[in-house]
Image (cartoon, grey):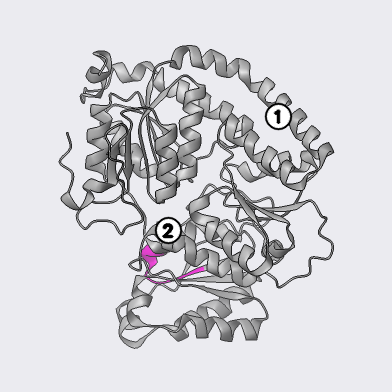
């Protein structure tokens, strides 16, 4: 068993070992080497896909390098978001302040690239020296005639989830600044999908086939002018609940727009996300179109899924992802393939999320909040996993253990959302688990525990 730090013991639970106690939404314990990112990174991953905006990092060059091209977020038009701008603060800036350096940088970049808006990210250094980023943004906005929005996200100011909130606050400042008279009655916003590998296009296509108009996507393939019209929708469909629930609640409080939390990963959850929207609008013709769409899409992928399931039945999977809703979908998607999830964890789950995760997991599943590499390594060995599904930071852990790995994070290049995404996911899991290469790698203890049925 892993020697878990005393301060973290109530953030790990094995289903069936009552009482149910799982602490969450806490700052990472010092010394645990958390897999989480910082507040600044949280804000960047949310806002990055706004493709026609200027994104400038007010801080040392390392912060901009760390988050450069951080998502595999595709654009159907401009690609200004893929450029990484920084004020490149140095020692003298820390002593004398860097407000004028930020101002001059903004003026030069706006004149050069003519963006529709600009996001200015505060980093740890700015939080320490106290630059008035808000004032500089207001001055530049007045002079240049575009929104210049501060993103208050010093890395030390909380967790990655606080960065999501800072990003939502910046987006909300754009809302309500454009007319919505031409928005049709059956209109939604898609919040929390970031067009990784083109997934927003897949989801948008489903809704358009149902007869639903999409006002804006926040922020996949995002456009500033669309984000200014977020208040014109009748419903917000929230895919990544950890990153976008704050914006959805703000829109509900000010404009009375309700929201639903959904997931587009896996057959069950994708179908449920489509049906929920159709039922919300109460249009029988729309509901009929939705049923036809689901039947058509499922029929196209089921023969292939059944073939993979014959090989994958009984295999054991571990998942560790950022948001809890993705974890729910992965557990169900793996069950569709005949696999069992034996380790499930997230970086930003809430108490309500973990209650739901416990309910859908099998007995003896290890449920963990804000894990660190030592804990993950130990539980992967103990549970005899066949595959580990996570993000870029978890890849090295899996490979060092001689364990198959599937990337479900924002750097990936393969679409995993929607019905076609389920097919892609099944292909990747099957190819990974069944690869003969794992018989050739040095032993780490995972394979032996699998072979003896542990």
Q: Is residue 398 left or right of residue 171?
A: left
Where does the magenta region start and end?
Answer: 56-63
Q: Residue furthest front?
A: 19
- On the image, the x and y values in percent for residue 411 come to 48, 45
- On the image, the x and y values in percent for residue 310 come to 49, 11
- On the image, the x and y values in percent for residue 347 come to 37, 49
In the rendered image, which quarter contains the C terminus?
top left
Can residue 115 be seen here? The reply is: no
The residue that appears at 60% across and 47% down in the rendered structure is 195
Residue with the mark numbered 2: 161
Rendered image: mark on residue 305: none
Which image quadrant is residue 405 in? top left
Residue 60 magenta-drawn? yes
Q: Is residue 353 above or below residue 310?
A: below
Residue with the mark numbered 1: 294
Q: Is residue 217 above or below residue 278?
A: below
Disc on the earlier residue, 2 or 1: 2
């Amino acid at each position: 068993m892993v020697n878990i730090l005393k301060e973290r013991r109530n953030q790990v639970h094995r289903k069936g070992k009552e009482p149910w106690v799982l602490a969450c939404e806490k700052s990472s314990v010092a010394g645990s080497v958390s897999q989480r990112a910082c507040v600044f990174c949280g804000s960047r991953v949310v806002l990055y896909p706004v493709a026609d905006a200027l994104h400038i990092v007010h801080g040392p060059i390392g912060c901009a390098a760390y988050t450069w091209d951080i998502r595999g977020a595709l654009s159907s038009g401009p690609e200004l978001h893929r450029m990484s701008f920084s004020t490149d603060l140095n020692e003298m800036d820390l002593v004398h302040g860097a407000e004028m350096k930020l101002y001059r940088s903004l003026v030069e970049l706006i004149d050069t690239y003519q963006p529709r808006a600009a996001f200015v990210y505060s980093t740890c250094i700015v939080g320490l020296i106290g630059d008035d980023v808000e004032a500089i943004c207001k001055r530049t906005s007045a002079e240049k005639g575009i929104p210049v929005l501060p993103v208050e996200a010093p890395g030390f100011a909380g967790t990655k989830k606080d960065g999501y909130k800072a990003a939502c606050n910046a987006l909300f400042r754009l809302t309500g600044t454009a007319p919505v008279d031409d928005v049709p009655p059956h209109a939604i916003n898609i919040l929390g999908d970031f067009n990784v590998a083109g997934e927003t296009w897949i989801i948008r296509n489903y809704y358009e086939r149902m007869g639903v108009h999409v006002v804006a996507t926040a922020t996949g393939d995002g456009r500033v002018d669309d984000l200014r019209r977020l208040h014109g929708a009748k419903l917000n469909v929230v895919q990544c609940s950890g990153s976008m629930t704050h914006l959805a609640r703000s829109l509900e409080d000010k404009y009375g727009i309700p929201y639903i939390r959904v997931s587009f990963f896996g057959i069950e959850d994708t179908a449920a996300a489509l049906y929920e929207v159709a039922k919300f609008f109460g249009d029988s013709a729309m509901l009929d179109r939705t049923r036809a769409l689901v039947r058509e899409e499922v029929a196209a992928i089921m023969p292939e899924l059944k073939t993979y399931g014959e090989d994958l039945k009984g295999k054991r999977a571990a998942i560790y992802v950022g948001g809890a809703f993705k974890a729910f979908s992965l557990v169900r998607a793996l069950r569709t393939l005949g696999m069992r999830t034996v380790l499930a964890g997230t970086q930003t789950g809430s108490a309500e999320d973990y209650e739901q995760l416990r309910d859908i997991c099998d007995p003896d599943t290890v449920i963990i909040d804000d894990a660190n590499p030592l804990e993950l390594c130990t539980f992967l060995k103990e549970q005899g996993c066949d595959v580990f599904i996570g993000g870029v930071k978890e890849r090295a852990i899996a490979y060092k253990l001689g364990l198959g790995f599937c990337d479900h994070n924002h750097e990936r290049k393969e679409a995993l959302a929607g019905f076609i995404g389920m097919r892609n996911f099944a292909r990747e899991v099957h190819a990974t688990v069944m690869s003969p290469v794992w018989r050739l790698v040095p032993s780490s203890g995972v394979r032996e525990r699998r072979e003896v049925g542990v």
